[in-house]
Amino acid sequence: MNAVNLKKNPIGIFDSGVGGLSVLREIRRELPGEDLLYVADSGHAPYGDKSVQLIETRAIAIVEFLVSQNAKAIVVACNTATSAAIATLRAKFPVPIIAMEPAVKPAAAHTKSGVIGVLATSGTLASDNFAKLHNRFGADVKILIQACPGLVEQVEAGDLSGSKTRALIAQYVTPLLEQGADTLVLGCTHYPFLAALIHQIAGPTVAIIDPAAAIARELRRRLTSAKLLSVENRAGSERFWTSAAPDVTRPVIFKLWQMEVDVQSLPN
Ligand code: DGL
């Protein structure tokens, strides 16, 4: 297939579950004409406490599936999967692969107090990738890290504002504020769906940084330089797959995507 035809092909996006929809919505905003394929690996969420090997195996299987659906580029809409598998994915698949990392750089540029808090999964915070980020920016600002077990599960269950979700956020965010953080990094793609609650708990003076819009712009740049940007003059489509039971994931995708869409079972 030549590059002219590839421009019409879809973009594949995946996450351990529904969290990557926070990235998908920014991609939809940035690239309204592109067709988008989304895989929620909800049958294996959360990735945060899984082994690197398991996450790598899942990421390879999902990217193989997306490539079989003619994906012209891949977005790893998951910080944990990026930490565990990005080098392997890039070595294995020849398509452009865009990946997430906690937005420490913009947070370090934004903080006035000189203290930032990073909310992420324990897998992301323990990774070499994060150690490199820490080394790069930790001399300029104080970087507080906070793993948030349980939050991904709350979002996977569609509970964005209940008492358990609120209590978990208070438990994780309050110590960061007490240590002077004025800027919080959402280092997991599930957390933007909790941003309203995090804002409520942290108060109006604390900045919350979500890199999803920057990732969507980076995707546009990568597609443009690879001559893969769609030139179709029409609204793009979205297709959804899940590795959990579609009847379980479907209502959560409806809620987060704010539209009724077809959700299919991810083939094994
Ligand atoms: N959305 C994933 C991330 O960005 C969540 C990881 C998990 O499933 O624990 O890290």
Image: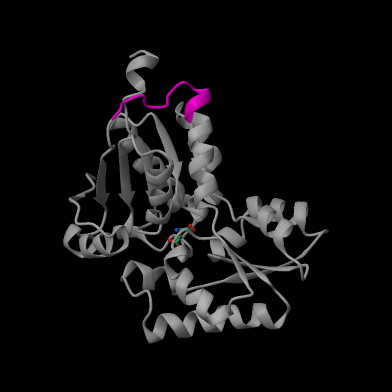
Which residue occupies the extreme right position in the image? 139
Q: Quadrant of the C terminus?
A: top left
Residue drawn at x 32%, y 48% is 39
Q: Quadrant of the N terminus?
A: top left
Q: Position of residue 131 (x, y in %)?
A: 69, 55
Residue drawn at x 34%, y 34% is 34
Q: Position of residue 82 (x, y in %)?
A: 52, 48
Q: Is residue 18 above or below residue 7?
A: below
Residue 138 can be seen, yes or no: yes
Q: In screen coordinates, is 195 left or right of 140?
A: left
Residue drawn at x 52%, y 72% is 148
Which residue occupies the extreme top position in the image? 2
Q: Nearer the viewer, residue 112 or 179?
A: 112
Q: In screen coordinates, is 248 left or right of 152?
A: left
Q: Which residues are magenta?
A: 223-233
Residue 88 can be seen, yes or no: no
Figure disc tally: 0
Quarter assignment of residue 30: top left
Q: Nearer the viewer, residue 35 or 188?
A: 35
